Image (cartoon, rainbow, N blue to C red):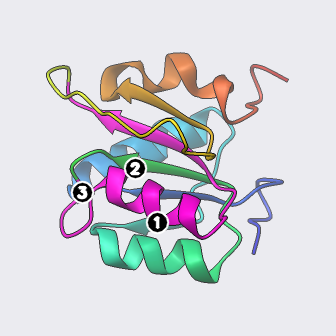
Amino acid sequence: MKSSKNSYYVALAHSDKSVSDKLAGQLYEQGIFIDSIFTEGIRTLGLLVSSAVEVLIIEASLPVLSAQDIILMASQKGIKTKFIIVTSPDQNIMLPPWITSKYIVITSDKILDRLSEIIPTRMSS
């Protein structure tokens, strides 16, 4: 399922709804519409398995299943989703070298600066 506003399916997973809403608003201003928003890992993984999510912006320490858990499972299942892992400045994310999924790790204050590495935006097209 693709949004009529994007040519790709973008989802967001963050435990804090106010952060999700703020980030979705900032992305919308850049021409990116968030198709789905989740607040915990199991529902996020369910979405990846059941839908053709092309980009998932995911909080590193998402409750129940972390971003690392979800990316590992997605890679094992051959899911081709691209991931933007949002961290706090003091977090360190280590993924095994066999991970086939494309991902970047960024702090929430830098997400708009590095967005075009994964999602083509109006400004980078």
- Give the amino acid at mark 2: Ile
Q: Mark 3 = which residue?
A: 62
Which element type, helix, strand or loop, lies under badge 3?
A: loop
Q: Nearer the viewer, mark 3 or mark 1?
A: 1
Q: Callout 2: 10 Å neighbours few (<14), some, many (20+)?
A: many
Picture coordinates of residue 30, whole percent (x, y): 63, 32
Picture coordinates of residue 74, whole percent (x, y): 53, 63
Picture coordinates of residue 15, whole percent (x, y): 22, 58
Image position of 90 (left or right of 99): left
Q: Mark 1 = which residue?
A: 73
Stretch of the chain drawn in magenta: 62-88
- Give the amino acid at mark 3: Leu
Please report the residue visible at 52 percent of the width from the left and 76 percent of the height from the top: 47
Q: Callout 3: 10 Å neighbours few (<14), some, many (20+)?
A: many
Q: Mark 2 = which residue?
A: 58
Structural distance between the alpha carbons of marks 2 and 1 = 14 Å
Relative to 45, does residue 88 appear above or below in the rendering? above
Image position of 93 (left or right of 2): left
Structural distance between the alpha carbons of marks 3 and 1 = 15 Å
Structural distance between the alpha carbons of marks 3 and 2 = 8 Å
Snapshot quadrant of residue 108: top left
Which quarter of the figure is the C terminus placed in?
Answer: top right
Q: Nearer the viewer, residue 97 or 66?
A: 97
Picture coordinates of residue 1, whole percent (x, y): 75, 75
- Give the amino acid at mark 1: Met
